[in-house]
Image (tube, rainbow, N blue to C red):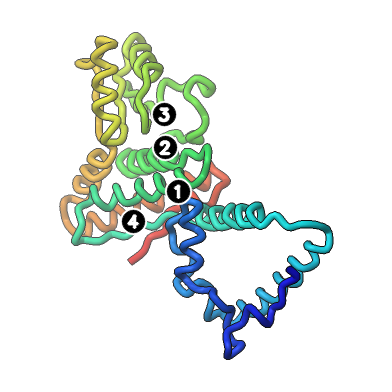
Amino acid sequence: MPLKFENLLTKSDGQVLGLGKTAVQNILRDHGVTKVLAEEGGRTSRGSVGNMKKYVAFLNGLKKSGDIDFEYIEKWWIQKVKAFFSGKPFLFSFDQSKSLRTIIRDLIQQAEKRQKQTKGATFVGTMLQYLIGAKLNILLDKPVEHHGASVSDDVSGREGDFVIEDVAIHVTTSPTEALLRKCQRNLDKGLKPVIITLQKGVAVAEGLSEQTGILERLDIFEAEQFLAGNLYEIGKFALAGRRTTAEHLIREYNSIVEFCETDPSLHINLTK
């Protein structure tokens, strides 16, 4: 310090010296970010040199006020990168070469990756609840009642995430003893409890329900299979029908997100 922007240019003065995908990704990887920020790392962008000159001027001005904590600055930029990634919608691609369960699993894995990068977020549970809700909207004669994924049943007075006829549906990523007690209350009120969870949650739900003594009185479904099976049935097992139904599912999901949430990154974009 002070920096000289001339020293940060390539010999041709047309690019920022040392800026590229590898350098950028190495820094991001140090902070646990594995997504690719930019294939060219900004190096070939016409605006990169201008941005660099402005940033050099900013840092030099900052230096006049005292020592610069570059570690703090790097962490600040990393948070901006994470916010950029979390602001992008999830992607759904109907690839006929893949099983429907694989396609649905890819969506859930996208949510899992984003959740790991965002402390305190519940992207997986939110996505799962709204996908199940979207499927029920398609299946039933009239839409079911939807609530924000963060609104607990106890607060809203509901018997489950969805109540249809005498069935109380509970959507969860991690079954707990509290959930099984809720299922017991469903049974006491004459309702049929159904738990829909991730693959790893099925065994947990079965174990807890057995301990509670209600294993034979409730149904437990793995979410991917629950969704994929209905896409086959509603689409009448035809390729065109499956594709149309899958697209309908995503449209319904996005409508629920718009109704219940304020975070646009929860949307799912259809890709070819």
> Which sits in the foreground, 102 or 129?
102
* Mark 2 / mark 1, whichever is N-terminal: 1
> Which sits in the foreground, 75 or 158?
75
Check disc 1 and report the residue beneath it: 114
Q: Give the residue at x 46% y 51%.
A: 32
Instruction: Decide: is 163 above or below 40.
Output: above
Q: Position of residue 50 (x, y in %)?
A: 67, 79
Mark 4 and mark 2 residues within 8 Å of each other at the beta carbon:
no
Q: Amino acid at mark 2?
A: Gly
Disc 4 to disc 2, C-alpha distance: 21 Å
Quarter of the figure with the N terminus: bottom right
Q: Secondary structure at mark 4?
A: helix
Q: Residue furthest right?
A: 65
- Whether residue 142 is visible here, answered yes or no, is no
Quarter of the figure with the C terminus: bottom left
* Mark 2 / mark 3, whichever is N-terminal: 2
Instruction: Decide: is 86 above or below 199.
Output: below
Check disc 3 and report the residue beneath it: 161
Disc 4 to disc 1, C-alpha distance: 23 Å
* Mark 3 / mark 4, whichever is N-terminal: 3
* Mark 4 / mark 2, whichever is N-terminal: 2
Name the disc covering residue 247, or none.
4
Q: Nearer the viewer, mark 3 or mark 1?
A: 1
Q: Amino acid at mark 1?
A: Arg
Q: Amino acid at mark 3?
A: Asp
Mark 4 and mark 1 residues within 8 Å of each other at the beta carbon:
no
- Whether residue 261 is visible here, answered yes or no, is yes
Q: Secondary structure at mark 2?
A: helix
For the residue carrying disc 2, how many other residues have a C-alpha within 10 Å: few (<14), some (14-19), or many (20+)? many
Name the disc covering residue 125, or none.
2
